[in-house]
Image (cartoon, rainbow, N blue to C red):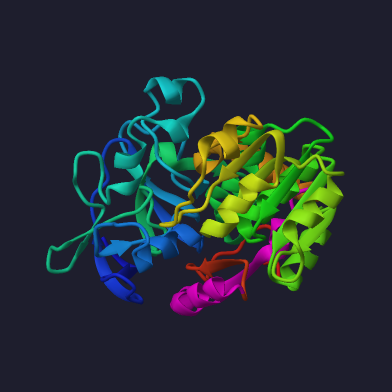
Amino acid sequence: MKVKAAVVNEVNGPYEFEELDLQEIQHDEVIVKVVASGICHSDEALRVGDAEYPLPVVLGHEGAGIIEKTGASVKGFEVGDQVVMAYNSCGSCPNCRTGHPSSCVEWTILNMSGARSDGSPIFKKTDGTPVSSFFAQSSFATHTVTNVHNLIKVAPDADLRLVGPLGCGFLTGAGTVVNGLKPNVGESIVIFGTGAVGLGALMTAKIEGCGKIIAVDIHDSRLEIAKELGATHTINSKTEDLAARIAEITAGAGANYSIDTTGVSAVMKASLDVLGIQGVAAPVAVTPNSIELNTFMDLVLLNKTIKGVLMGDSIPQLAIPKLIEFHKQGQFAFDKLVQFYNFDDINQASADSNSGKTIKPILIIDETYRAGEPLLK
């Protein structure tokens, strides 16, 4: 099957459209006609080489589409189903069986190796050259092959042009709050970076009843959006004294929790420094940067914790329907953060995301698609 895909052929190279051969599905896979896909910072990190990855590659891991073919052992999904695609997991290891599929023992192989677990590719160039896949979905293509464990079925009237980013960015932000940090009602949280992940975390912190929700960024326009979505306080760390403002807001106690979505070394360290006694920091950005700390002074003395939370420690099949329901109730207004682009404009969409002009770009890959609701502007 011939498909149109946006291919990254070299580190820091542009997305280049090519006709690829989509390989035949295996017994536990499906073919999805991709309707739309969000662009995530993780796509950019791989494109520019912040994380090493086998090239050429078809990126994209916030896809939504319609099933066109199912493998022999696929159950619970049929041709014509509308689906969101998230990450893959084995489904049978102890971590998967206890509700932590993002801690799957095969997670890296299944999502980050560039191929199926048996080493076979999903795409090939017309000359037979294998093309790597990403997150076992590669949604920057008109059609893709994905595993049944990637799939989340959504209602027939759900607008697939909108819901794809729930598969990664918003899932990560929301899950980091609910599953990673687990704040009690009234506790305080500081969120560094007001992109899709940060604002997803912010909206969820409001839903969870956090008392002080502090958004930190260097762009006033982003901080205004944060206020609209539930921030009780905002700090422009470029023009304000971060430590002094946090001390003022928390009456000197420091914050209970923090999330860093920037991956900037100084900001990651600041997310630890603003915590009070027994505070917990979650650095969730894909970044090549690191921080230097003194384990006694920075952690032990005040019983602080740095906690890794991959993909929000979420079960996508349970979390994404909840986020859709919160959206319907007006509590998770992620539609205010998106900008739609034609698939052919992927390089412009990526540039707008990098510059901060667009919080969450969504590529419309199937322009003929119509849902029960009109496309949100």
Q: Quadrant of the N terminus?
A: bottom left
Q: Residue at x 25, y 39 (%)?
A: 117
Asked if residue 340 is among those painted magenta in the image, a careful observer would answer yes
Principal SS element in the magenta part? helix
Residue 40 visible at all: yes
Q: How many marks?
A: 0
279 to 156, vertically: above or below: above
312 to 43, vertically: above or below: above
Q: Residue at x 62, y 76 (%)?
A: 357
Q: Residue at x 43, y 41 (%)?
A: 150
Asked if residue 214 is among those painted magenta in the image, a careful observer would answer no
Residue 314 visible at all: no
Residue 156 locus on image (x, y percent): 61, 48
* Residue extent of the magenta highlight: 331-356
Residue 81 locus on image (x, y percent): 51, 45
Residue pushed farthest left? 127
Residues 256 and 342: in front is 256
Q: Quadrant of the C terminus?
A: bottom right
Residue 341 locus on image (x, y percent): 55, 74
Residues 41 and 101: in front is 41
Residues 204 and 180: in front is 180
Residue 250 locus on image (x, y percent): 83, 44
Name the image quarter holding residue 359.
bottom right
